[in-house]
């Protein structure tokens, strides 16, 4: 096993995967970016559009044009065998255990033994992710939880399992530190780890309070923005940035792992509102806007 990461694969070209790939490419390292196969003639359209979005991001590009030249795009139906050329595979697909597990089963047959593989999951314990996988896969597996947007958030939460080889974790951490400028926090393999065990609950409590007090989102974010340490977006703006569609997945995933009397469950009052907004297509900035009608095509300009 080489101890150098010279080529990375990111699977899932959504909010996080695109941002992680951009950061790797900005460091001058080649990246293979894969998503599901599109239904149109361009089967790699999702990854292609993700790269274009990173280059066009406002107010500052997330990836230079030069770095974009280091990104090879593809889809998991036609290009999965190319992961064998990669030293680190980062999984950033939708927050669903079944989807992640079936992807790992496929990766097990094509990846190069010794290559590191990590999940960007927000809430799912490592022990659940690797259920049914071979010993060799489990030895190369860890969680690397990046924060949104990866370009600007320096924190990286890392979870190693009892069977993760220390050399694999060390290789990934050295790359994240030196090439990507991350500051690493080691978390235990608990539901939500550190950040989302606290953060998901805290966001819900803040939203509940705003609704009980009858505040507008602007008023709530004026209070819950700079004064509470979320200066750029405020709390409702943060939900728009994360993606409203991710919220119920996080809440259900985390909730399913916690004790029945955990206060987290009582904080889920906002779930219905979020689900109604998702049904209407308001999934946040990546869609047609969320609590704020800002989307990425409008470059952050409010309607
Ligand atoms: P997203 O919904 O923006 O993107 C997910 C992408 O995965 C989509 O492009 C989808 O087509 C693709 N995908 C789904 N199944 C796939 C498969 N089997 N193979 C390849 N691609 C597949 O989701 P987002 O927000 O980027 O989240 C991805 C992961 O990162 C989740 O585990 C989430 O919990 C985690 N995360 C999200 C953060 C956020 O702020 N949005 C922050 C930190 C972690």
Image (tube, rainbow, N blue to C red):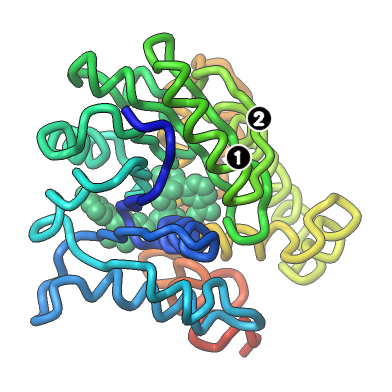
Nearest the eye: 8 or 270:
8
Label 2 residue SS: strand
Residue 195 at what x, y percent from top left? Answer: 63, 35
* Closer-to-camera residue (7/275): 7
Count all numbered tags in the image, as a single digit: 2
Residue lying at 52% horizontally and 39% vertically, measured from the top left:
145
Residue nearer the viewer, 125 or 178: 178
Classify the position of the N terminus by image quarter.
top left
Q: Residue 135 in the image: x percent, y percent?
A: 23, 14
Q: Image check: 294 left or right of 232? A: left
Q: Which residue is mark 1?
A: 156
Disc on res. 185: 2
Residue 62 lies, with reference to residue 125, above or below; the image says: below
Q: Are marks 1 and 2 in contact (CB under 8 Å)?
A: yes
Q: Is residue 50 above or below residue 23?
A: below
Left or right? Give the position of 126 relative to 84: right
Is residue 152 placed above or below 299 in the rendered structure? above
Q: In this view of the protein, can residue 249 be seen by the observer?
A: no
């Amino acid at each position: 096993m080489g101890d150098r990461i010279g080529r990375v694969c990111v699977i899932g070209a959504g909010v996080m995967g695109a941002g992680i790939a951009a950061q790797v490419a900005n460091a001058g390292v080649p990246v293979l970016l894969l998503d599901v196969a599109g239904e149109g003639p361009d089967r790699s359209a999702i990854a292609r559009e993700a790269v274009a979005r990173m280059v066009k991001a406002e107010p500052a590009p997330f990836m230079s044009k030069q770095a974009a030249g280091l990104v090879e795009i593809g889809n998991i139906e036609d290009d999965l065998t190319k992961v064998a050329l990669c030293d680190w595979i980062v999984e950033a697909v939708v927050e669903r255990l079944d989807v992640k597990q079936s992807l790992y089963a496929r990766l097990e047959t094509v990846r190069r033994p010794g290559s590191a593989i990590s999940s960007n999951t927000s809430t799912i314990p490592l022990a659940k992710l690797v259920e049914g996988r071979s010993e060799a896969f489990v030895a190369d597996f860890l969680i690397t939880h990046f924060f949104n947007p990866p370009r600007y958030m320096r924190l990286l939460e890392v979870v190693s399992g009892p069977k993760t080889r220390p050399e694999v974790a060390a290789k990934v951490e050295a790359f994240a530190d030196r090439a990507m400028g991350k500051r690493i926090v080691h978390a235990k393999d608990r539901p939500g780890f550190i950040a989302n065990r606290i953060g998901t609950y805290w966001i819900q409590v803040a939203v509940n309070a705003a609704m009980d007090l009858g505040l507008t989102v602007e008023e709530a974010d004026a209070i819950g923005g700079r004064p509470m340490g979320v200066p750029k977006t405020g709390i409702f703006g943060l939900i728009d940035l994360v993606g409203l569609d991710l919220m119920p997945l996080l809440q259900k995933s985390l909730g399913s792992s916690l004790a029945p009397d955990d206060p987290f469950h009582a904080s889920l009052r906002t779930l219905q509102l979020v689900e109604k907004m998702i049904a209407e297509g308001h999934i946040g900035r990546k869609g047609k806007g969320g609590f704020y009608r800002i989307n990425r095509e409008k470059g952050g300009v409010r309607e």
